[in-house]
Amino acid sequence: MTESRPLAIGINLSFCVKRWVTPELWAPVVRERLGLDLVQFSYDLADPLWPAAVLERQAAAIRNVSADHGITVHSAFIGLAHYTFNQLLHPDPDVRDFAHVWLERAYAFAAAAGITRVGGPLGAIASRVDGAEPEALDEREYDGLVTRMLSLAERAKAEGLTELYVEPTPMRREWPWTIPQARRMMQDVAGAAVPWRLCPDWGHGTFQPLYGAGADSMEPWFAGLADVIGAVHIQQTDFQYDRHWDFTVPGAVDPAAAAAELRRNGLGDVPVFLEVFYPFERDDRSILEAVATTAQILKGAMA
C-alpha cells in the first residue's frame, strides 16, 4: 500500500564544511533558515583524533545547542576528509589498523554528543599500475573487511550506539558497489552486536558510466534492499558523475518521483538527507539561498 504521510527530510552538514563549523553556527542555519529539524553530522566538522578535552567540549556543544534549537542529530557520517584515505582497505595493514581506531574514536565522540548512529563508506583498495579494475574484492580482502565490521560493531555497542551504516559507492575498488554485493555484506554481518544497515545515495546508484544507461532511478536498489536500508542520501545529479548538486541546479532527479520511489518500496519511514557540496570559494550568501530553496522544494515534494 502506498504511504501518504510526509517523509522525514533532513540535511547532512556537508554544506557547512569550512563555513558554519560549530553548532552555534549551523544549528540556527538549519532550524531558522532551512526550516529543518533533522541533521546528519559530518566528521569534516570534528576530527575524532583531536585532543580529548577539545572533543569533550565539541560533543557537549552539539548535544546542548541542537537540543536548544529543537534539532535531532540522527547520525554522524565520516565526511570527505577521512573518505579521501583508503581506510579499512588500504594496502598497508598498519593504515587499516589506524582507520579502525579512527572509527572507534568516531563512535566514542558520537556517543558523547548524543548521536546513536554512525556510518559512511568503509574503504577502497589501491589502484593497479595498469589501471585495470577488478569486478569484486579479493575474497581475503572481503573476509578481512567483514571481520573488522563485526569487531567495530562490538565497540559501537560498548559505546551505546544503536546502528551502523555502510554507504555503497559507484566504484569497483570500494565495497559494496552492486546490489548483490550489498545483500551479501548485510547477510554476512547480520549477527553483529549492533545492526549494520545501508545508506544508499541517489547519485551513487544512478551512476550510468558504471551501471549502464538503464540506471536512471533508485528503484532497483530500493526494491532489492529495502529491508536493510536505514537512511538515504538525496542530491541533484545528471547520472554521469556523483554531482551532489542542490535542487536549484537542473538535473535528472525529480523530487516528487523520488518520494514516490521511496514510498512504493516501503521506505516511507526512512529519513532522507540532502547531501550537497560546494566549492570553498563560493560566497556564503548564495549557498544559504540555494540550500534554503532546495529544502523547500524537497519538503513540498515529500509532504
Image: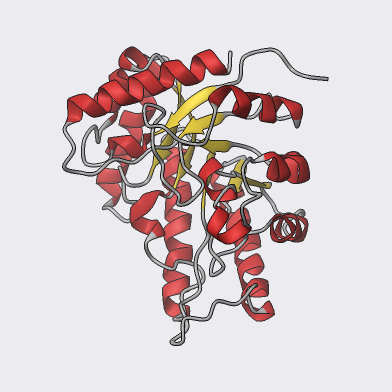
Q: Position of residue 229 (x, y in %)?
A: 67, 41
- Taking the spot 29% from the left edge, 35% from the top edge, the residue there is 16
Camera-side residue of 31 and 102: 31
Q: Position of residue 172 (x, y in %)?
A: 57, 67
- Taking the spot 41% from the left edge, 74% from the top edge, the residue there is 95
Locate residue 274 relative to residue 220 in the image: left or right. Answer: left
Q: Exactly how many numbered labels are in the figure?
A: 0
Q: Position of residue 248 (x, y in %)?
A: 37, 26
- Taking the spot 41% from the left edge, 58% from the top edge, the residue there is 83
Camera-side residue of 264 and 208: 208
**Measured along the vertical axis of the image, is residue 144 above or below residue 242?**
below
User: Does residue 116 appear in the picture of this structure?
Assistant: no
Camera-side residue of 281 and 185: 281
Q: Quadrant of the C terminus?
A: top right
**Measured along the vertical axis of the image, is residue 284 above or below residue 50?**
above
Looking at this rendering, what residue extends furthest in the right direction?
1
**Measured along the vertical axis of the image, is residue 298 above or below residue 44?**
above
